[in-house]
Amino acid sequence: MALDIKSLVPCIDGSTITREEFHNTYLKPQKPVVLRGLWKKYPAYEKWTMDFFKKSMGNIEVGLFGNRKEDISKTLEVPNATMRFDEYLNLIEREPTDLRLFLFPVFKHKPELLKDFDYPEITKGYIKIPFMFFGPPKSIVRMHQDIDMSNVFLTQFHGRKRVVLFAPDQSDLLYRLPFNVHSIVDVDHPDYKTFPGLKYVKGMTTILEHGDTLFMPSGYWHHIEYLEGGFGLSVRTVANSLNMKLQGAWSLGGRRLIDRMMRNLMKEEKWFDFKKKVAHSRAEKAMSKLNRDNYENEFRSSNTVTT
Ligand SMILES: O=C(O)CCC(=O)C(=O)O
């Protein structure tokens, strides 16, 4: 049985949406949306190609991350490999590999790129943090929430990407690891026996193409598959709700620190086992609550019919 991720993320014309419309319809209610053509008016839209990056900054050394099984409980901090940027771009054009260039601070290396665009009107007034992401065909970004719980505007420049989203209120049913922003489930191969909570989750899917910007509200879970080798830019703006701001600060500071400390204090495997146990116990509680709520609703509606 496949996961319930068939519903599509709504997709609208991003070139005409006003700031007010975006704010009222998507930002304030925290609803994901694909804004098609939001970046079309900027030079970057046509200029930023694989060849452009190879020629303009191919000689820099970049740190790459793979999907090693043993890393599942860690946030990505230390790269698994390094390579010249142009060699890496040739590699991801040529063949699948699991090496991704993650949270790449491209403007630190080449500040002139900032002249190739202006931040879209809908993000004006917020502090913006831009990063680029490059990945090879078939590579997977395992399911996670962003550690700072920011609102994310993810624009695709080259290649297509499939993105699966889940709202933050489904964290427990997605077996979120405590002291971490990762889930231990595999969205594409759901194991309902080990993770029965997956029977209750409801996600959304979209495929991003050149010029599509996906708005991912704070705390949204995302699982990404690169359908082709390609790259995108994410612009992050601070969460609007106080709750998400606090969660972001706690994740960046306390939660990460405790996780690192415990990994050093305990045997790494033991700490990971403990975290998995907590994730399973939270999922059990979330399922019991849903079953109780469903039972009460059914009871109430059958009573309404008979009285
Ligand atoms: O596009 C990617 O490779 C990852 C994007 C992502 O996870 C993010 O923007 O938070």
Image: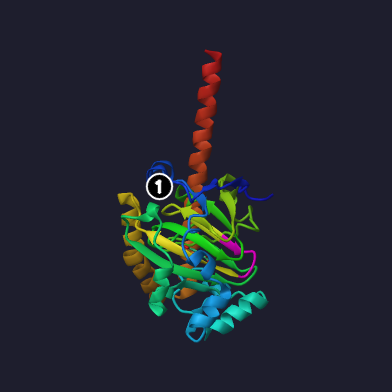
At 57% from the left and 74% from the top, the residue drawn is: 50
Image coordinates for residue 219, horizontal then vertical, percent: 43, 54
287 or 180, nearer to the observer: 180
Going by the numbered disc 1, the residue's amino acid type is: Leu
Question: Crowdedness of circle 1 by 10 Å Cα count: few (<14), some, many (20+)?
Answer: many
Q: Which residues are magenta?
A: 224-229
Q: Secondary structure at mark 1?
A: helix
Whole-percent x, y for residue 60 in the image: 47, 85
Q: Is residue 15 visible?
A: yes
Establish whether ligand 1 lies closer than 8 Å to the Cβ of label 1.
Answer: no
Residue 70 lies, in percent from the top left, at 54, 74
Residue 230 lies, in percent from the top left, at: 59, 69
Colouring method of the image: rainbow
Q: Residue furthest right?
A: 1
Residue 142 magenta-highlighted:
no
| Rendered residue at 57%/59% (across/down) | 185
Residue at image point 57% right, 55% down: 164
Kindly identify the residue that appears in the image at 43 percent across and 58 percent down.
152
Q: Which residue is mark 1?
A: 27
On screen, residue 193 versus residue 129, left or right, reads right
Pick whichever, 158 or 140, lies toward us: 158
- The extreme top residue here reads 307
Q: Nearer the viewer, residue 221 or 231?
A: 231
The answer to whether one can see residue 266 in this image is no
Please determine whether, in this image, residue 115 is positioned above or below residue 285. Answer: below
